[in-house]
Image: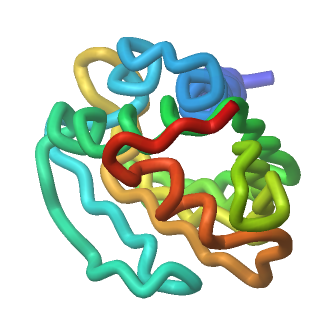
């Protein structure tokens, strides 16, 4: 195996670790790990399935917006599989990966669970700290359960016992 092949294998392993670290950081509320997955500025595209506009913001602001939502659920589990990594150059890559994102919150409005099925198409850039996500795009193909728990989770003064 030549040096270029070895480097590509190392790059794939690191990109995979970052992609999976994103899920692990989210579910464990390890916001330092979550933040370490991103370049200093990140483009976030959750428009498909959630209707949110595409935004470009600092990774610190992305963490600040994400943490309270995920912490308001009793539990979440983001399973990321079937990673396909392609290289646009030595320092840019795209990772397409399936996701099943489960959100659990007992409540008095219906089902306690909501699940998003889809895939991420994330653009990675090599930085001085290694590979990082510069653009995260979630394509939600379908959802099951109580979508209202997202609103319930952030309602002021909510109690979920």
Residue 96: percent from left, percent from top: 67, 61
Q: Residue at x 80, y 53 (%)?
A: 112
Front position in the image: 153 or 61: 153
Task: Please count the marks in the image.
Answer: 0
Q: Is residue 42 left or right of residue 8?
A: left
Residue 131: percent from left, percent from top: 42, 30
Residue 108 versus residue 70 in the image, above or below: below
Q: Residue at x 46, y 43 (%)?
A: 158
Q: How is the image coloured?
A: rainbow
Q: Is residue 104 left or right of residue 36?
A: right
Residue 147: percent from left, percent from top: 66, 72
Using the rendered image of the protein, determine whether residue 19 is visible from the camera's viewpoint: no
Residue 37 versus residue 105 in the image, above or below: above
Image quadrant in which the N terminus is located:
top right
Q: Residue at x 36, y 41 (%)?
A: 157
Using the rendered image of the protein, determine whether residue 74 is visible from the camera's viewpoint: yes
Residue 157 versus residue 161 in the image, above or below: below
In which quarter of the view is residue 60 placed?
A: top left
Q: Residue at x 39, y 53 (%)?
A: 155
Q: Is residue 117 left or right of residue 87?
A: right
């Amino acid at each position: 195996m030549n040096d270029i092949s070895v480097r590509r294998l190392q790059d794939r392993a690191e990109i995979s670790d970052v992609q999976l670290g994103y899920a692990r950081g989210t579910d464990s509320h390890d916001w330092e790990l979550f933040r370490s997955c991103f370049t200093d500025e990140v483009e976030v595209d959750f428009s498909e399935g959630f209707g949110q506009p595409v935004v470009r913001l600092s990774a610190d602001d992305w963490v600040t917006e994400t943490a309270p939502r995920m912490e308001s659920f009793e539990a979440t589990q983001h399973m990321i599989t079937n990673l396909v990594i392609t290289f646009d150059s030595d320092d840019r890559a795209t990772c397409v990966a399936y996701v099943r994102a489960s959100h659990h919150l007992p409540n008095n409005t219906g089902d306690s669970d909501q699940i998003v099925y889809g895939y991420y198409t994330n653009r990675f850039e090599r930085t001085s700290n290694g590979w990082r996500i510069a653009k995260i795009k979630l394509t939600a193909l379908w959802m099951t359960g109580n979508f209202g728990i997202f609103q319930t989770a952030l309602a002021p003064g909510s109690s979920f016992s």
